Amino acid sequence: MTSRLFRVKPVHDHLVRPRGGLSGEIFNLRQELGESFEHVETVTGDPAVVNQTSWYVDQTAGDDGNDGDDAAAPLASLSELNRRLGSVEVTVPVAVQVTGDLDEGSLSLTANCPQGLTIEGVPTSIFTGVFTAGTQGFDTTLATVQDCRIEDTALPADWVDSGPGGTSLVYKMVRIVGGARDGATAWIMKDLGAKVARCSEFMQDTTAVTPQAGDAYEVLDLPVINVDGSPNLLVDAPPLSKIVLSYLHVKAGGGTSEAVVMTRSGVEFWRCKMEGPAPYFRALSEDRPLTIANSLIRVTTNTRVDFCGGPSIYLWGIAAANASLVFNSGSNAKFFGHNIDQKDGNMLPWIEINPGSFVNLDDLSSFGSFDSTTLTWGTAWIEANGTLDVGNQAVLWDQNRSGGKGLYIRAGGKCHWSGGNAVDYFKFDAGVAIEVSVGGTNSTVAALGAVGLFNINNGAGVFPDQ
């Protein structure tokens, strides 16, 4: 074992893409080098494996004594893969295929892979069918936002009991098979009866698509990574590293409230399901961003999903189940596409922006919640020195809210929209309790008009860009 001292520069990435439509646009990350700093690294990995580009992990068929470079002789755990890679710099892109469920305990991913480490699960198809006439995509231009729905009149029962052995297909991934939308995925969020289900946004690679009647589909189970430790999952690769997890179900046990902890490294979750008592994400300021795209976050005990720190948190097409996304410690977050929270009675806000944090809803994007009880703290809750920026033709909305508030801005909090009339940007359940509360002053969206409202007593405000 040796140690070495070297200089690196922290990386700050920004999402660079033209303003306007989401369709056909791709995440492009631009590296901007800041001040250099010293970093001490202990090299523990085996230099003999640092050029290996493909790895296979299968707990049932594998053995941690295998080479792991062949699907016929896989490793049995990601922990062993991480041990072998150690912290030696891996100069090639690394792809890891996970087959079947894994029991990892407390899992750490610390490999130094500047060319990228991609860990992708092999999903299992558990149901197939064809969408019928009741299928529709999101439309936020309507006075009442149209949600995304799928219908299959040939289902043997309903979405809650048409799975294997009569099990539920809700909170499963659905994927279109064949045709122009081949490979597009979404999450089944609620059985609406009559063989119709509400879904999250369908994404085909990095493009949003609208499902159509006649599209063939399959419902998928993802390989489960069972983690139950403290922390459950720690991603702590050195600066300049990038780790991508895809088609995986990260499931935290009840032993800790921290389902996922992020530090120091660039981490991306694509088409993943994260489930646990209270998922917790932390990204430090010297690193690449945290990206969560086309993924489901399901909270099983608490309702908070905490994001702590990080100059760049990118959330795209998120589906949440009874979750409240809480931005702390000066977090800087950006939403893309349509993002939903299926609350089913939960009363906490969909978005909570705490002091010093900034959240941007990108042009033509939206976030909103369904079926909440009294939202005492609003669909969006903005604390002092917190800011919500609503982009051009973006929409903040809720539906089937039984009470409480739509937009709740505390003293010193700010919300601004791109310009024009507020009714095009805020679409809350009309006439249900309070639509907008600004520093203790209640109003309606219609009354905001094209001017907004500023509370001179405490500095809270909601207003259009000038």
Image (cartoon, rainbow, N blue to C red):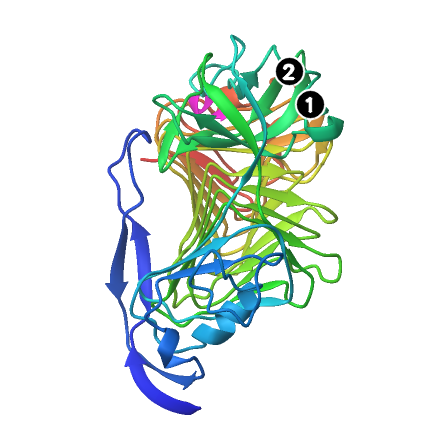
Which one is in front, 128 or 206?
Answer: 128
Mark 2, residue position: 155
Residue 201 appears at what percent x and percent y? 48, 29
397 or 413: nearer the viewer: 397
Most common SS among magenta residues = helix
- Graded by Cα atoms within 10 Å as few (under 14), some (14 to 19) or many (20 or more), the crowding at tag 1 reads some
The amino acid type, in three-letter code, at marker 1 is: Ser
The image position of residue 268, as x and y in percent, is 43, 53
Q: Callout 2: helix, strand or loop?
A: loop
Q: Which numbered dot is residue 162?
A: 1
Q: Crowding near pointer 2: few (<14 within 10 Å), some, many (20+)?
A: some
Amino acid type shown at disc 2: Leu
State how far apart marks 1 and 2 are (Cα): 7 Å
Residue 80, picture quadrant: bottom right
- The count of marks equals 2
Q: Residue at x 36, y 24 (%)?
A: 420
Whether residue 333 can be seen here: yes
Apparent side of residue 194 relative to residue 331 in the rendered image (left or right): right
Q: Quadrant of residue 140?
A: top left
Q: Residue furthest bottom?
A: 2
Residue appearing at x 35%, y 89% in the figure: 4
From which residue to which does the magenta span run? Answer: 422-426
Report the residue at 46% width, 56% height from top. 71
**Residue at image point 41% right, 80% down:** 46
For the question of whether residue 167 can be seen, the reply is no
Say which element carries label 1: loop
Question: Residue 117's image quarter?
Answer: bottom left
| Mark 1 or mark 2, earlier in chain | 2
Look at the image and say whether residue 238 sits in the magenta stretch.
Answer: no
The reply to whether discs 1 and 2 touch (Cβ–Cβ < 8 Å) is yes
